[in-house]
Each structure stands twice: as structure tokens, then as C-alpha cells.
Amino acid sequence: MKYLKYILIMIVVLIFVNCARTVEDYWEDSGVIFTFIYSYNFETGEDTQLCIPRNFNNYSPNGDYYLSSKIEINEKGNRILNIKAYDINSNTIINDVVDSLFLRSSMTNLDKIVFSNNGEMITFSDSLIYTVNVDGTDFKMHTIGKYSTFSPDDSKLMYVDEQGYISTIRIDNGNIERILLDDEVTYPIYNPLGDEIYYYSDKVIKKYYSSESLVTIIANMQSDPVEYIKFSDNGNKKLILGDVGYTLDEYENINLIEEITFYGDISPDGTKLAYLDVLEEYIWVTDFEGTNEERISWWGCTSSNNIYFSKDRTKLFYLLEIGVK
């Protein structure tokens, strides 16, 4: 066992031989933590190492590129944000999406960037909410708020404003509508049809019916915080990610899946779940009920909060951080 550390280092060095970045470059960035993007092909059963990402933030909807985000402090103490798009195979820059944006907040890391449903725009926030096309054009600073996401038709952003209201703003003309006020709202999100809003408030998952202006309680999460709610394409099935994972079926029946934590995704057709088991340190795929487990990753990983089913359902992308301690 005393030689295991050195064997692992030699394996990682050999992997780097055919990669776009050198071992020295990555070692300077990350010390003894090595990060890789992998894809698993459900049709062939093969997993492929794609690249060593630079400041990874999120995958594109089709998985052909990824976004990086980096916040640096200049000589005047200002925080400067840069967002770039990299080809996921060659790891070469496609676009400078956001170039040298001065941030208002003291944040040191950007939350996950959200893509529009057509894949052409992104939104992100510090204390202000922004949108920009993925080719770097039509950059807009909208309003004060957080947790911004797109409406299903991409015409609006939904967010939580500075007073705690779930609100929307039209991207084209800036018209703002306040929808509702609740306690400690986080991560509001439309269902894919756009007629319901799911959100987390004071340890409870709630649903707002737009047509009836009615709020109902879906589940009491007790002490479990919720980070994300993810939907199948038709909205019938949902995956709730937090300290533990839950699923909601089309009848809003809730099912606890203890192995799932903050790190997971639901397939577009709602038949599969993918997640990181933080204890065993492997990526698993199961059916929606949490049964018929299949291990995807071929070695353990210390963290992976970026697990993503491709829109065509053929691949699973995941980020592995492999450390020598």
C-alpha cells in the first residue's frame, strides 16, 4: 500500500501524454488534484476521457463544448470575471463569451451558469443579473437579483429580487413582473410547460399554479436543504438535489434515494438517474425508482458536481476530480 500513491501518480502522468495541457500546467493550477471530463456512451458502453477542463463551470446542452468561468482580482482590488467556451474534445477556445466584467459583489466563484432552452444564451448573476449570447454578442445587465433562469420560451428570466419576490423580467424590453413573495425563496424554476413554478422556501418545496395564482406544498424537506430541481423534458418527473436526493413522479409522489446528494441529473425522457455516491466515490446510473444500478465510472473520485445527460440521451458527461493525498 505504501507504493499506491506513486503508482497513481505514474498512471496520471501517462494519461497526460496525449492531452492538450501539460502536466506542469495543470500541476501549477491544481497541485495534486487532477480534473477530467469524461463521457459514457450508453449505446456502446464505453467511457472516454475528453479533456482536462480549464476552470470548468457547465456543459453546453449538446455536450459539444463547455463553459469556463474565472474571477481574478486586479491591481485595484476589483473582481474581474471572464467566461470562455472551450471545445470539449480539443480543449481549444471557441468564444470569449464574457471579457473582463467588473463584478459588484465580493464573490470568488461563479455559481453554475444557466443555458437558455434553445442553447443560444446564458444567464448568471452576482448581485446583478446578466444575459449574453454564447457567441459573446448582445451582453445585457438587467436588474438586481439572484437565482436567474429562463422561461420555457426564453423570452423572460425568472429570479428572486432584492426584497425576496419571485419575479420575471422580459429580456427584450426589461418589463418586470412580481409574481409572489414567500420566506427565504431559493432556486425558483419553471416546469417545461411554463404553467407552474417550483421553488424551495423555508424547508418546504412548493408549487405555484400560474393560471390560478395558487401555491401548494409538494414536500416538507425537514432539515434537508435543496440546491436544484431538475425536470424530464415533459416535466412529469423531477429530481430534487440536496443533502439527500428525492424524486417526484407525475402524481407528485416523493421517493427518497439516500445515495443521491447534490451531484446528479435526470435523463431527458425521465427513465434514468445519474449520481455520485459520495461514500463509494463512483458514478452510478439507475432507473427513475433508484433500482437497477449500473456503475459508470471506472475509478473512484473525490467530487463530481457536474453530471449531465446529453439532450439526445446517448451520453452521460461527468467531471472527475482525482486526488493524491
Image (cartoon, rainbow, N blue to C red):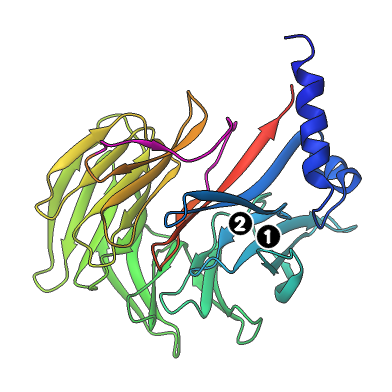
**Residue beneath disc 1:** 69
Query: What span is in magenta?
Result: 290-306
Q: Position of residue 82 (x, y in %)?
A: 73, 66
Q: Check residue 194 in the rendering and tell me which mark sits there, or answer none.
A: none
Q: Kindly check if marks 1 and 2 are in contact, taking CB atoms under 8 A apart as contact.
A: yes
> What kind of residue is marked 1?
Ser
Q: Is residue 183 visible?
A: no
Q: Which residue is mark 2?
A: 57
The reply to whether the magenta stretch includes residue 298 is yes
In percent of the image, x 31 and y 45: which residue is there?
Answer: 240
Instruction: Answer whether residue 90 is magenta in the image.
Output: no
Asked which secondary structure carries label 1, the reply is strand
State which tag comes first along the sequence, 1 or 2. 2
- Report the quarter where the C terminus lies: top right
Query: What secondary structure is found at the residue carrying circle 2?
Result: strand
| Tag 2: amino acid | Asn
Q: Quadrant of the N terminus?
A: top right
